[in-house]
Image (cartoon, rainbow, N blue to C red):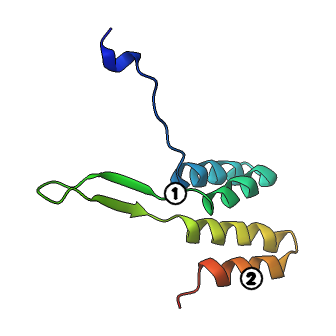
Amino acid sequence: MSKDKKRPLNVVVTQEIAYNLARAFHFVGLLDLACAYYNRVFELPVAFSAFKGGNDQSPELLCDMKREAAYNLASIYVASGSVLRAKRLIVKYCTIA
């Protein structure tokens, strides 16, 4: 066994992971878990890709999942009758200023 296989994995939970879990829970109707993971998206760091090729060694931003999470969470809130809460999310995360 090589040295690389003996080291524990350093896993970073990113917005994308939380968003994908939330979508899965949302899809199967587990809305309480979906809401919890959509809310985690707002707290977690954005995922970065591998370094760009060439001399530029800065990481390239993949995407920020906050808008998608806000929209999906707002749809859950509207369906449950919490329209004001949904509106706050949409204004905060989905409005271009």
Q: CA distance from mark 1 to mark 2?
A: 24 Å
Instruction: Say which label, 1 or 2, has the lower sequence index.
Output: 1
Give the side of residue 80 with respect to residue 52, left or right.
Answer: right
Say which mark, if any, is on residue 87.
Answer: 2
Within-10-Å neighbours for mark 2: few <14, some 14–19, many 20+: some
- Residue type at numbered disc 2: Lys
Task: Name the spot of residue 66 as percent of width and height, x first.
Answer: 57, 67
Say which mark, if any, is on residue 45.
Answer: 1
Dot 1: what SS? Answer: loop
Dot 2: what SS? Answer: helix
| Residue 68 sits in quarter | bottom right
In this rendering, is residue 25 above or below 93?
Answer: above
Placement of the N terminus among the 4 image quadrants = top left
| Residue 72 sits in quarter | bottom right
Label count reads 2
In this rendering, is residue 35 above or below 50?
Answer: below
Residue at the far right: name it.
81
- Residue type at numbered disc 1: Pro
In this rendering, is residue 50 above or below 90?
Answer: above
Discs 1/2, front: 1
Task: Name the spot of residue 18 as percent of width and height, x first.
Answer: 60, 51
93 or 58, which is in the foreground?
Answer: 58
Give the side of residue 77 with respect to residue 45, left or right.
Answer: right
Residue at the far left: name it.
54
> Which residue lies at the image location 74% right of the left edge and 82% below the top edge?
87
Within-10-Å neighbours for mark 1: few <14, some 14–19, many 20+: some
